[in-house]
Amino acid sequence: MLYANSTPAEKRARFRERLASGELLRFPGAFNPLSARLIERRGFDGVYVSGAVLSADLGLPDIGLTTLTEVAGRTKQIARMIELPTLVDVDTGFGEPMNVARTVQELEDAGAGGIHIEDQVNPKRCGHLDGKEVVDEASALKRIRAAVDARRDPNLLIMARTDIRGVSGLAAAVDRAKALVDAGADAIFPEAMATLDEFAAIRAAVDVPILANMTEFGKSELFTTAQLADVGVNIVIWPVSLLRLAMGAALRGLDELDAVGSLAALTGEMQHRADLYELIDYEGYNHFDAGIFTFDVRK
């Protein structure tokens, strides 16, 4: 009932232990707390909070318009509902190194298991769009050093994302990844890798966990978890997938409602009310105070 039993610190410690095992961890993107709970119930290893999803949820493009307050607020809503670790996209850290430091502590307080900070210029762009620009190496390293210095829980994962592959090529991405690790990054997110060989090149270059972004309609082929594990990837995210699936279903429902005037033909595609009640744990609330919650979840 209500929120997770584990503290954020406990979840972060377990996350570090799982990463140290060397296995591939699967982090689908949640678009709200309810979808995060569904990810947990289906047996995944963690939940990803995507900047692109949060922007889209607000009706905005993914160009750095969201604020630290909005990201921290959504992170808290999601992280407190689940026992799984939450990995959060904080774009470029919301400003200069001092802003990055504040971002780290705000997300730590919100319950994040880890964050990733990228090396794009402000305002940033979606990582799979053309026309990206990255900051110089010195500026990128300052962001990571500020993040590492600011965290209070050493188990908070500080991941560095580099977008330089799409700007200057793979060799530059390898060099940037090495420098980011030297600056203190606990893990590397090489954005928009085109092939498995490119992931393997990053894997060979650094001795920290690496992440693969399997977003649809982007620069990367949609590799399977088995393929990614074979080249040494440690975390895989599907950042926008659940939102895309949900919005596709919503669009089909609206079309059916407009054309037919009823959704009776689509009820078989809907989550049943009983399944929703089970996911939300209505029974737990009923047990807590039967004098108030008098519903029957079996209907």
Image (spheres, helix red, strand yellow):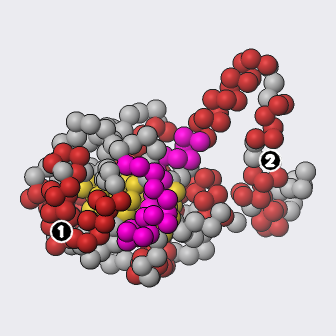
Number of the label disc, if any, that sits on residue 178: 1
Q: Is residue 170 above or below residue 229?
A: above
Q: Name the quadrant containing residue 49.
A: bottom left
Sequence-wise first label, 1 or 2: 1
Q: Which residue is mark 2?
A: 272
Q: Quadrant of residue 154?
A: bottom left
Q: Residues within 10 Å of mark 1 (few under 14, many from 20)?
A: some
Cα separation, mark 1 vs mark 2, equals 49 Å
Q: Nearer the viewer, residue 86 or 264?
A: 264
Type of amino acid under label 2: His
Q: Is residue 136 magenta?
A: no
Horizontal and vertical percent position of residue 112? 43, 64
In magenta, the rendered stretch is: 220-245
The quadrant in which the N terminus is found is bottom right
Q: Report whether residue 112 is seen.
A: no
Q: Is residue 39 left or right of residue 48?
A: right
- Residue 137 on image: x %, y %: 11, 57
Is 249 on the left or on the right of 264, as rendered? Answer: left
Tag 2, which secondary structure?
loop
